[in-house]
Image (cartoon, rainbow, N blue to C red):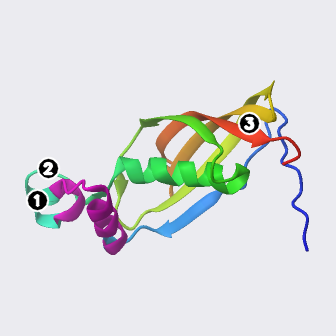
């Protein structure tokens, strides 16, 4: 049985990145229906082009935020995220890839572990940031 290695909570430590691969129309449609956000700029290419002046449908901003949350829970565990703030910086086109990264900014000892502040960024394939933010993550002692 493999014993998990303790997490590096030092200031400046990087979380293992999370990459999505191309975000397909199908994935966007599934997200739209699951979230209840059926805004036509996300699901109707004709509307996106003709009414919104976009080249195609765009991925939901909250999808990017969800992937940033996924980055955190893969790193520290499913019940670890205490708060997350995100600023949407740019539109993410359908078929773009998304890479999510985090860096430890601060660590405060608390009962049973540490409260860690993580700086977050989600970038598309060309390196442009589509979402930035920060999160408070609880890391249990010995994790």
**Residue at image coords 82%, 39%:** 9
For residue 82, above or below residue 55 = above
Where disc 1 sits, the SS reads: helix
Residue density around tag 1, few if under 14, some if 14–19, many if 20 or more, within 10 Å: some
Quarter of the image where one finds residue 106: top right
**Residue at image coords 91%, 64%:** 3
| Observer able to see residue 127 | no
Of the pair 136 and 128, the residue shown nearer to us: 136
Choose the circle earlier in sequence order: 2 or 3: 2
Residue 61 part of the magenta segment: no
Choose the circle earlier in sequence order: 1 or 3: 1
Where disc 3 sits, the SS reads: strand
Residue density around tag 2, few if under 14, some if 14–19, many if 20 or more, within 10 Å: some
Tag nearer the camera, 2 or 3: 3
Percent across and percent down for residue 84 are: 53, 36
Q: CA distance from mark 1 to mark 3?
A: 41 Å
| Observer able to see residue 103 | yes
Q: Are marks 2 and 1 in contact (CB under 8 Å)?
A: yes
Residue density around tag 3, few if under 14, some if 14–19, many if 20 or more, within 10 Å: many
Query: Circle 1 is placed at which residue position?
Result: 47
45 on left or right of 33: left
Q: CA distance from mark 2 to mark 1?
A: 7 Å
47 on left or right of 67: left
Choose the circle earlier in sequence order: 2 or 1: 1
Percent across and percent down for residue 143 are: 84, 48
Where disc 2 sits, the SS reads: loop
Label disc, if present, on residue 52 of the rendered structure: 2
Tag nearer the camera, 1 or 3: 3
**Residue at image coords 47%, 51%:** 66
């Amino acid at each position: 049985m493999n014993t998990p290695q303790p997490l590096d909570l030092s200031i400046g430590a990087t979380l293992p990145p999370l990459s999505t691969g191309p975000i397909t129309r199908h994935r966007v449609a599934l997200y739209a229906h699951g979230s209840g956000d059926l805004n036509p700029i996300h699901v109707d290419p004709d509307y996106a082009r003709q009414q919104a002046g976009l080249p195609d449908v765009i991925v939901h901003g909250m999808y990017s935020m969800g992937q940033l949350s996924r980055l955190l829970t893969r790193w520290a565990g499913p019940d670890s995220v205490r708060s997350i703030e995100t600023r949407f910086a740019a539109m993410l086109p359908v078929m773009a890839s998304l890479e999510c990264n985090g860096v430890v900014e601060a660590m405060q000892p608390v009962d049973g572990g540490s409260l860690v502040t993580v700086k977050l960024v989600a970038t598309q394939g060309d390196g442009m940031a589509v979402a930035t933010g920060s999160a408070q993550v609880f890391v249990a002692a010995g994790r």
